[in-house]
Amino acid sequence: MCVLVETPDIRLLIDPGAAIMQPRYPAPTEIKLYYLELATAALVAAAARATHIAITHYHYDHHRPDVPELFREKTLWIKDPNRWINRSQWERSRYFLSVLASERGIEVEEVSPEKGEYPDPLEELPRARKEGASEELRRKWRKRFLGLVRMWERGPWVSPEPFGAQVVYADGKVFEIGKTTVRFTEPLFHGVEYASPGWVLAIIVEHGGKKFLYSSDLQGPIIEDYADWIAAEAPDVLVLDGPATYLRGPLQAAATLERAIRNCVGAVRGAGARITILDHHLTREPRFREACREAFSSGAITGAEALGLPPLTDRLSAWKANGELGEIVERARARELDPDLPSRGLSVNLLEL
Ligand SMILES: [Fe+2]
Ligand SMILES: [Fe+2]
């Protein structure tokens, strides 16, 4: 879901990450590893052009501490590692900062937690409260949230101070660079109410009356109020992650998936963007188009299509149907499959809209 957003003032690389696909993704491991290698090369090429990097949360498909050169000499706007974060990302963010610190020859600084208020986030989501998960589920999930609040209050926190102006915790912040405005939302659930994967930041970039919106991992969105917010922003370009239809079954209840699809379609239609890229969670299984039919018939396209290619799941189905998969694996081994992809990462120039 990495995108380079350009204006005359800034080249902002959002979420430079890529991870290997889930075990059930319909490709041989060799093909998955090959595309991961191409994606990593694309990240390096895009980062070379970037002035700023945003990290909306600490999943490895959104940041790559194993490729520290991505972050060299950039200003980093990153998710606050100390609040509104789950346990695993709390650890990962600290690891990421330690990698950055050692790259820059400095030490990570631990500090005492700031005093803060952690109101129940559902207070601000009236539609989800009314139409979303049952009270019984919410009560269970809220307990997990209260456990995390104790972790944030206990600390220790990590300070951005040693990095100077090069690392900023971006939750809820607005940055003005020349005539470009970059707005980070307050933390949003990574999925359902009190989502176990934690929180993400969505990003809006504006210049010359044009607006770009990157949702990050809202998984649909699942939350009704987030769909309303995306529609109300009415961006010219929308990059939305879509429902995780590949998790259908024990990991994603049917009712939640229906909710995610409904709100995804609502967000796409409501926003009415000139360009809607619907990808990431959605394109991880071959039947995604069927699941989100109404969003695609409203003009959404996948990230691959934005680069002039069919989505990989479609290509894999065709390769399999034509008995070409063996040959494709050979081409990957010879590094001859889509060799130009690393130079064609997804980028949006607000001046060209
Ligand atoms: Fe994520
Ligand atoms: Fe993700």
Image (cartoon, rainbow, N blue to C red):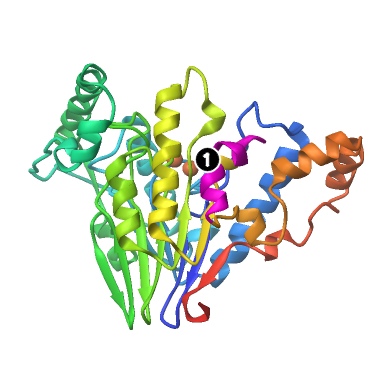
Q: Which residue is mark 1?
A: 281
Q: Taking 91 as reference, is 331 above or below it?
A: below
The picture quadrant for ligand 1 comes to top left
Q: Is 289 part of what is drawn in magenta? A: yes
Q: Main secondary structure of the magenta part?
A: helix
Choose top left, top right, bottom left or bottom right for residue 327.
top right
Residue 217 makes an appearance in the image: no
Q: Taking 88 as reference, is 234 above or below it?
A: below
SS at mark 1 in the image = loop
Q: Which residues are magenta?
A: 285-298
Q: Is mark 1 within 8 Å of ligand 2?
A: yes
Tell me residue 37's x, y (percent). 69, 48
Identify the residue shown where x is 28% and y is 49%.
80
Q: Nearer the viewer, residue 160 or 310?
A: 310
Q: Taking 2 as reference, is 199 above or below it?
A: above
Q: Nearer the viewer, residue 49 or 344?
A: 344
Tell me residue 291's x, y (percent). 56, 36
